[in-house]
Image (spheres, grey):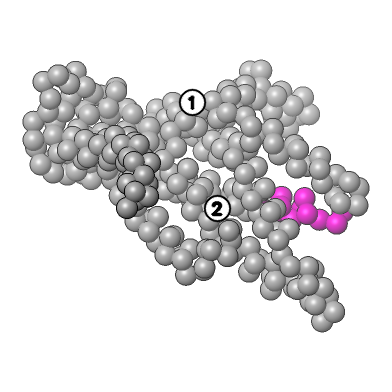
């Protein structure tokens, strides 16, 4: 009985943090989404308007473009590029060729640099690299005669999304690669040796032994990358400010613009609830997939 009380007292701080930092802000945000709360009249508070914010949100033509940018460009394209490159890099670092020339350690250490770089610093550095006047890429392409005029990568609608995806990938790819590399190294050597005895070539080993062994870690990284990307505000805002115009506006930047530029706190809260709902559904689907694949084996 005394042990139970002691455990309860130990859990009290955790309950306090969960309630104060998670449940209370969530509930406060849900309530605000049903009001006309205005940034400039916070002390007065908002009046109850029911579902009007949600109706206005789904009838807003801008919301369709923001939703498309968030789900297709930022999340689908961004996560696909990251997972694909992460797999290729993991296989490259684990290859016999790099091991033969003792370059494996060098590649692993080089991955630490972008991983250890804060996202703000990464965006600032890449803005300088992509700058149309003094940027390294434009200067190099012009010097070798590939371009006559510099390209404004972050303000040209044809190049702005690939540029943003490049920045995000550079900064976050190392974690994906190192996770896949750890999974790759955990493939039982006995299975690979048995496949060699049976006459399997390298491609057959990858398709029938290595990739099936890595599926749980791939699913987890897709899930985690999707959460980090879908809700991300920093990369798009710092790189383009949701521009040119509102061309790269995503749901996270739209929440900020509606709340602190337009002052529509209630509408912004409704948009935040829609974002959270989408991610909740997505998370449940992926968690069910993880359970089915016996996630416990990963850990």
Magenta-colored span: 86-97
Q: Nearer the viewer, mark 1 or mark 2?
A: 2
Secondary structure under tag 1 reads helix
Q: CA distance from mark 1 to mark 2?
A: 25 Å
Magenta part mainly helix, strand or loop? helix
Secondary structure under tag 2 reads helix
Q: Residue at x 28, y 29 (%)?
A: 258
Query: Which is more toward the observer, 151 or 84?
Result: 84
Question: Going by the image, does 31 lie left or right of 77?
Answer: left
**Where residue 105 appears, x then y in whole percent?**
81, 43
Report if residue 157 is visible in the image: yes
Question: Going by the image, does 293 lie left or right of 31?
Answer: right
Q: Read off the residue under disc 2.
A: 221
**Where residue 33 appears, x then y in whole percent?**
19, 38
Q: Residue at x 69, y 32 (%)?
A: 113
Where is the C terminus found, in terms of image quarters? Answer: bottom right
Q: Is residue 145 above or below residue 7?
A: above
**Where residue 138 appears, x then y in whole percent?**
68, 26
Q: Read off the residue under disc 1.
A: 238
Q: Residue at x 45, y 28 (%)?
A: 237
Reply yes or no: does residue 269 show up in magenta: no
**Where residue 179 appears, x then y in whole percent?**
64, 51
Q: Is residue 209 above or below residue 45?
A: below
The extreme front residue here reads 2
């Amino acid at each position: 009985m005394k042990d139970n009380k002691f455990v309860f007292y130990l859990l009290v701080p955790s309950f306090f943090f969960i309630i104060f930092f998670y449940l209370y802000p969530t509930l406060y945000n849900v309530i605000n989404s049903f009001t006309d709360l205005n940034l400039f009249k916070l002390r007065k508070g908002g009046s109850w308007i029911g579902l009007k914010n949600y109706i206005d949100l789904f009838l807003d033509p801008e919301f369709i473009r923001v939703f498309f940018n968030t789900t297709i460009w930022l999340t689908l394209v961004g996560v696909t590029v990251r997972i694909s490159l992460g797999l290729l890099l993991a296989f490259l670092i684990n290859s016999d060729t790099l091991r033969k020339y003792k370059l494996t350690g060098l590649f692993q250490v080089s991955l630490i640099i972008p991983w250890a770089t804060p996202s703000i610093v990464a965006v600032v550095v890449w803005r300088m690299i992509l700058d149309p006047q003094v940027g390294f890429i434009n200067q190099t392409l012009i010097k070798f005669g590939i371009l006559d005029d510099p390209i404004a990568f972050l303000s040209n609608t044809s190049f702005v999304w690939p540029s943003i995806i490049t920045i995000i990938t550079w900064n976050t790819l190392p974690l994906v690669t190192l996770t896949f590399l750890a999974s790759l190294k955990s493939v039982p050597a006995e299975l690979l040796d048995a496949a060699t005895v049976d006459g399997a070539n390298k491609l057959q080993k990858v398709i029938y032994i290595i990739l099936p062994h890595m599926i749980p870690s791939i699913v987890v990284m897709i899930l985690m990358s999707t959460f980090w990307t879908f809700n991300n505000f920093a990369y798009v805002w710092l790189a383009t400010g949701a521009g040119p115009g509102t061309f790269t506006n995503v749901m996270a930047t739209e929440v900020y613009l509606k709340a602190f530029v337009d002052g529509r706190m209630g509408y912004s809260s409704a948009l935040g609830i829609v974002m959270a709902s989408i991610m909740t559904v997505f998370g449940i689907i992926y968690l069910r997939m993880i359970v089915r694949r016996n996630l416990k084996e990963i850990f």
